[in-house]
Amino acid sequence: MSLREGPRISSGLAGLDAILQGGFIDERTYTIRGDSGTGKTILGYHFLTAGTDTGETALYFAFEETAKDITANAAGLGFDLEDVIIEDMSPSATQFMDDGNYTVFGPGEVEATDIVSRISDAIESHEPDRVFIDPLTLLRHLTPDEYQFKRTAASLMSYLKERGVTTLFTTQSTAEQSDEDLQYLADGSITMRRTERGRELEVEKFRGSGFHSGSHGIRIDAGRGITVFPSLVPGDHEQSFHYETLSTDIDPLDGLLGGGIERGSITLISGPSGVGKSTTGTALARASASRGEKAAAYLFEESDHSFSHRSDAIGLGVSELRDEGAFEVHEVEPLSVSADEFAHRVREGVEERGVEFVLLDGTAGYRLALQNPEGELRRELHKLCRYLRNMGVTVVLTDEIASVTGTFQASDSQVSYLADNVVFIRYIEVGGEIRKAIGVLKKRFGDFESTLRAFAIERDGVHIGEALSDLRGVLTGTPSRKTE
């Protein structure tokens, strides 16, 4: 049987299985690389327990921790290793030198043949389906020299393959020794790392199969271990839908937009702080929920409590729609959620709960999750919005403009190219009084009204007034009357 035709087995992580396009190929060897604390051992727990859950025999060779510590640490993360056979290869107290120097497993202290014998005896005795070796690099200290180590490691991997075992082993580079020279031993290589964006996982090699390249977000939580969030590939997701114009339930806004916004379109609402972007976006989401669709608002810059209070105070009736299950509100802490994890949450709403309208309130807050706003905000928003459009979901983004008045621009974040519709709300100063104006800059799917109208938020919701036909220079923020 060729490598490509080999059956798949689960890694124990649904997200990683998706990245590997079905899981590990059976009876092969895989390495998990990464610095200390990146989650390599926890991934091993998932791999082992996935086997015992399906009746396979799982064997754990532990070179770094005692079996007692492993069991306790795993339990703290929600893993029961009772059915996993743990071979404790860690140093015992009697292996410390009598003179008090805490050097463990000196090069001449343990013969490689003794280690190989212990491993082969355990494999012969238990006939495992899965083996986890943690970490393989500690074998360096258990063999007399580098040549013997590489020979022992290569022989061990060949032996495990011949026995039909699927093997996972961890490696870790040190200041003195890189683990690069061990990658030839494995049919696949996965690197785990911690970055400014959070924890990530990347498949660097996977013989005999395609896989999803690039970095993918991961999270480690007590009680459930690792969750992997595959990076979103918009082209992999699509469903048919009918284009139709949807009313905003605000007649003058429908007039500005040439009837409303189209299903599956992306609308950008931009303006300075406090001008009414979030309220307008909420009004559009409410209109969607009121006509029988499920709407979801993701808040990057406001608490759920504040959002609900503000919305109800102006008569939008969000609480009632939430009680009916037609309107979801999700408060997002961007510094604790990666872009991959957030995209996964949005996907769950669309694919599992039937969300048809998404409000992303605050691209400035979303930017915080990316750490590299210049290069990644547009890329991640592009992927997410393209996915939502492919799924026929109507999207509204709110984007804050830094300047209150002055030179007009549609977006500070340079994301206006994503939008099918661009609605802007501006402060203007007329006769010493601060007022607001609203207009439409762009509509991809039809004509729109090019006039500017008065805008206000009052106790009974969003109000759009008459065209500001008696003013000129409105976009400068300091218009003058045409008669002046």
Image (spheres, helix red, strand yellow):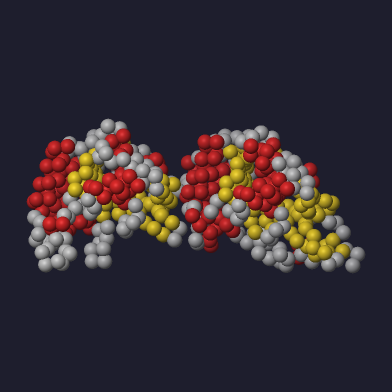
Instruction: Say whether residue 462 is visible.
Output: yes
Instruction: Please state the horizontal and vertical placement of residue 321, each as a whole percent of the image.
Output: 66, 38
Q: Does residue 105 appear left or right of residue 305 in this picture?
A: left
Q: Is residue 186 above or below residue 176?
A: above
Instruction: Please state the horizontal and vertical placement of residue 81, each as a whole percent of the image.
Output: 28, 41
Q: Quadrant of the N terminus?
A: top left
Please count the marks in the image: 0
> Image point 63% across, 39% down: which residue?
322
Q: In which quarter of the image is residue 147?
A: bottom left
Q: Quadrant of residue 316?
A: top right
Instruction: Say whether residue 447 is visible.
Output: no
Q: Does residue 432 appear left or right of residue 31 in this picture?
A: right
> Image point 24% across, 52% down: which residue?
65
Q: In this view, does 290 lie above or below 437?
A: above
Identity of the residue furthest to the right in this view: 483
Identity of the residue furthest to the top in this view: 55
> Image point 74% across, 41% down: which residue?
249
Q: In which quarter of the image is the C terminus?
A: bottom right
Q: Does residue 79 appear left or right of residue 240 in this picture?
A: left
> Image point 69% across, 60% down: which residue?
272
Q: Does residue 122 appear left or right of residue 176 in this picture?
A: left
Instruction: Please state the horizontal and vertical placement of residue 252, each as a whole percent of the image.
Output: 79, 46
Query: As rendered, which of 210 and 343 lies closer to the eye?
Result: 343
Q: Is residue 54 above or below residue 20?
A: above
Instruction: Please state the horizontal and vertical placement of residue 11, each as a whole percent of the image.
Output: 33, 41
